[in-house]
Image (spheres, grey):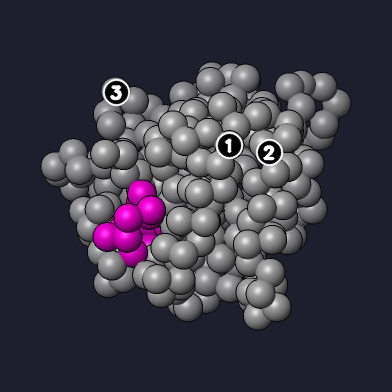
Amino acid sequence: MRRSLVVGNWKMNGTRSSAESLAKGILSGLGEDVADIAICVPYVFLNEIGQIVQNTRLGLGAQNVADKPSGAYTGEISAGMLKEFGCKYALVGHSERRTYYGDTDESVAARYSQAQEQGIIPVLCIGETLEEREKDKTFEVITTQLDAVLTKAGVNSLDNAVIAYEPVWAIGTGRTATDEQAQEVHQFIRQYIADKDKAVAEKIQILYGGSAKPDNAKGLFAMPDIDGGLIGGASLDAESFLKIYHSV
Ligand code: PGA
C-alpha cells in the first residue's frame, strides 16, 4: 500500500506572525500519523518555520526552485540553499508559475533535476486548462508535461518524486474535479508511467490539487489512484488543513 501525502501550498500569503501561528496550529493538531504531511511556505518564512517544524513529522517545502545550481540569476533561490534550510520538498511547475512567470516544460524539468541533485523531493505539478479539457486534450497535455521530465531525468527519477495533478480550471476557483474526473486522470498518469516501469508506477504518490476542501477530500482520497492532495486555499487555516489531512 502506498502511503498518502498531504501538502499545503501557502502561495504568497501570510505575515511572519501569521505564518508562525499557522505552523504551530498545524503541529499541535497533527494527531494520529495517518499519512505524510508537509507545508510549502514562502521562501522568506523557511528559516522560522523550519525551526518550528524541526524534528517533527511536519515536512518543510518550498514553492519553486531555481533551474540552475548557482550564479548570476538575480531573484532565484537554488536547491542547495533550500536544502540548507531543511526543505524536504519543492513544488515545480505549479500552474501559477507556468502561467504568470513563464516556467516552461524545459525549465520545469531542469528545476526538478536541481531539486533531486540536492536530495529534495520535487512535487511535479501538471494539469490542463479548461480550454484544453473542452477540446479533449487533457491526456495530450499531461503526456507532454510528463515527457519533458522523463526525457531529461528518466523514469527511475520518479522513485524520488511526487506528482500533483492539478486541473488549472479547478485551482482557486471553488470548482473541484469530481472524484471520477480526477481518478480518470490519475489512473492515466499511473498507467503511462507503468508502461515504462511498473514498480515505479506502483510506488509513486500522485496527489490531487484544485479546490480540495474538508467536505470533498474524503471522496477524492478514496479513489484508488489518488494518494493525497496539494492544498492551496484550505491550507491557510489549520483546522481545515488538518481535517483534509485526516480524510486520507
Ligand atoms: P487551491 O490551490 O486548493 O486553492 O485550489 C491548489 C494549488 O494551487 O496547489
| Dot 2 amino acid type | Val
Q: Is mark 1 within 8 Å of ligand 1?
A: no
Circle 3: element type: loop
Residue with the mark numbered 3: 55
Q: Is mark 2 within 8 Å of ligand 1?
A: no
Measuring from the top left, give residue 44's x and y in whole percent.
56, 38
Q: Give the distance between the C-alpha atoms of the residues marked 1 and 3, in whole angstroms.
A: 37 Å
Residue with the mark numbered 2: 149
What residue sits 56% from the left and 27% below the top? 156
Q: Which mark is residue 196?
A: 1
The tag earlier along the polypeptide, 1 or 3, is 3
What residue sits 47% from the left and 56% below the top? 186
The tag earlier along the polypeptide, 2 or 3, is 3
Write down the region rendered in magenta.
220-235
Residue projecting furthest to the left = 32
Q: Give the distance between the C-alpha atoms of the residues marked 1 and 2, in whole angstroms.
A: 13 Å
Residue 247 vs residue 80, the one in the foreground: 247
What residue sits 76% from the left and 27% below the top? 68
